Image (spheres, rainbow, N blue to C red):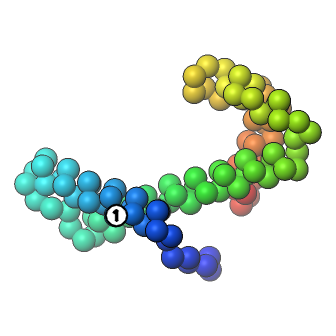
Amino acid sequence: MEEVRPLTKEPAASLRCYLAVSDLAAYALDGSWLTPDCLVESARIWLARLTISTEAHVIAKAVLESELKDTDAARPEQLFTDVMTVNYASTVVAKIWRRCSGPTGV
């Protein structure tokens, strides 16, 4: 079983804000607050995103530290084909993709 770590101050504040805004939006849309089950599910989804974001950071750092000889290969114009389209032809992106799609994701 995976270790459950408490959220630090900033992520906890972000989660509270996300849930409060979601609750307020639900009330504004249909005049009723989210149920506790809905809030728990929203928190679960938010935490899954946080986990994926954390894993992505670990992968990026590992690729930089162990697989790149110089950071020129990590320049944005090498990693993206336009504003936000990943350049899958990049060797750096290929290394990241292999790590992201591996059995553990990290």
Residue 63 horizontal side relative to residue 36, left or right: right
Residue 45 horizontal side relative to residue 3, left or right: left
Residue 9: x and y in percent read: 46, 68
Identify the residue at image location x=66%, y=20%: 81
Which image quadrant is residue 24 in? bottom left
Q: Is residue 1 above or below residue 90?
A: below
Residue 12: x and y in percent read: 43, 67
Residue 71: x and y in percent read: 83, 35
Return the residue found at the far right. 69
Which image quadrant is residue 1 in? bottom right
Return the residue found at the far front. 9
Report whether residue 87 is seen.
no
Residue 75 horizontal side relative to residue 39, left or right: right
The secondary element bearing badge 1 is classed as helix
- Badge 1 is on which residue? 16
Residue 55: x and y in percent read: 65, 56
Identify the residue at image location x=56%, y=76%: 5
Return the residue found at the far top. 82
Q: Amino acid at mark 1?
A: Arg
Q: Is residue 27 above or below residue 35?
A: above
Identify the residue at image location x=92%, y=39%: 69
Identify the residue at image location x=13%, y=47%: 29
Quarter of the image with the C terminus in it: bottom right
Residue 33 versus residue 72: which sits nearer the camera? 72
Report whether residue 37 is seen.
yes
Residue 37 versus residue 21: which sits nearer the camera? 21
Few, some or many C-alpha atoms within 10 Å of disc 1 (few <14, some 14-19, many ≥20)? few
Q: Is residue 49 above or below residue 79?
A: below
